[in-house]
Amino acid sequence: MFMGQYENSIDAKNRMIIPSKFREELGFQCVLTKGIDKCLYIYTMSEWETFAEKLKALPVSNENARKFVRHFNASAVRCEIDKQGRMTIPQMLRDYASIQKELVTIGIMNKIEIWSKDEWNEASDDNEMDPADVARNMEAYGI
């Protein structure tokens, strides 16, 4: 399970270093794709297969379902993680997430989110909940 928040950056060859706490679970291959909220998602190969099966089950006759599948699948790339724990982020995905140099990498249970540090800082107010909202959501979600 992925958890925690880390700050890192990409190098001149557009590689990011995967935080060491995430490397063992990821292994040497993963899938990188567009996320939601202008971030990128990293999935383990097995988690991607589970997600892809759900995408495959969506009705091709439904326009919104087709757009949903395209959002994730058209931008998905299989990435190799080198022995130093680095992974290249393709240009189209860097553009989507507005990634220039500085990153915020966040463990979100079954996947990892990669954010441009600037985008994360802009969105951080939206990502924070006040304690009363946390308590209401815990109750609403049965946690």
Image: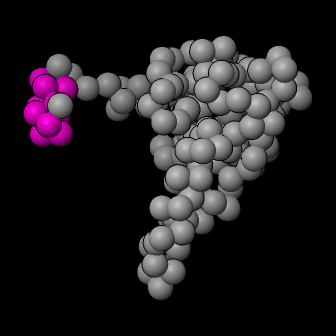
**Residue 89 is at least partly visible in this image:** no
The C terminus lies in quadrant: top left
Is residue 135 one of those drawn in magenta? Answer: yes
- Please tell me which residue is depicted at 20% across the width and 22% down the height of the picture: 130
Q: Is residue 123 left or right of residue 46?
A: left
Residue at position x 79%, y 24% in the image: 86
Determine whether, in the image, residue 36 is placed left or right of residue 130.
right
Counting from the top left corner in percent of width and height, residue 56 is at 54, 69
- Image quarter for residue 75? bottom right
27 or 106: nearer the viewer: 27
Compare residues 4 and 45 and report the one nearer the observer. Answer: 45
Instruction: Tell me: residue 139, above or below residue 58.
Output: above
Residue situated furthest bottom in the rendering: 61
- The spot of residue 8 in percent (x, y) is 67, 16
Relative to the observer, which residue lies in front, 141 or 6?
141
Q: Point out residue 117 in the picture as x, y percentages from the top left corner.
A: 59, 24
Colouring convention used in this rendered image of the protein = one colour
The answer to whether residue 62 shows anywhere in this view is yes
Tell me which secondary structure the magenta stretch mostly adopts. Answer: helix
Left or right: 86 in relation to 36:
right
- Tell me the quarter of the picture where residue 21 sits: top right
Q: Residue at x 51, y 17 (%)?
A: 5
Give the magenta part as a residue range. 132-142
Left or right of residue 74, residue 129 in this image: left
Q: In this figure, what is the number of numbered marks?
A: 0
- On the image, the x and y values in percent for residue 54 come to 48, 61
Answer whether residue 25 is magenta in the image: no
Residue 50 vertical position relative to residue 113 in the rendered view, above or below: below
Kindly identify the residue that appears in the image at 67 percent across and 62 percent down: 74
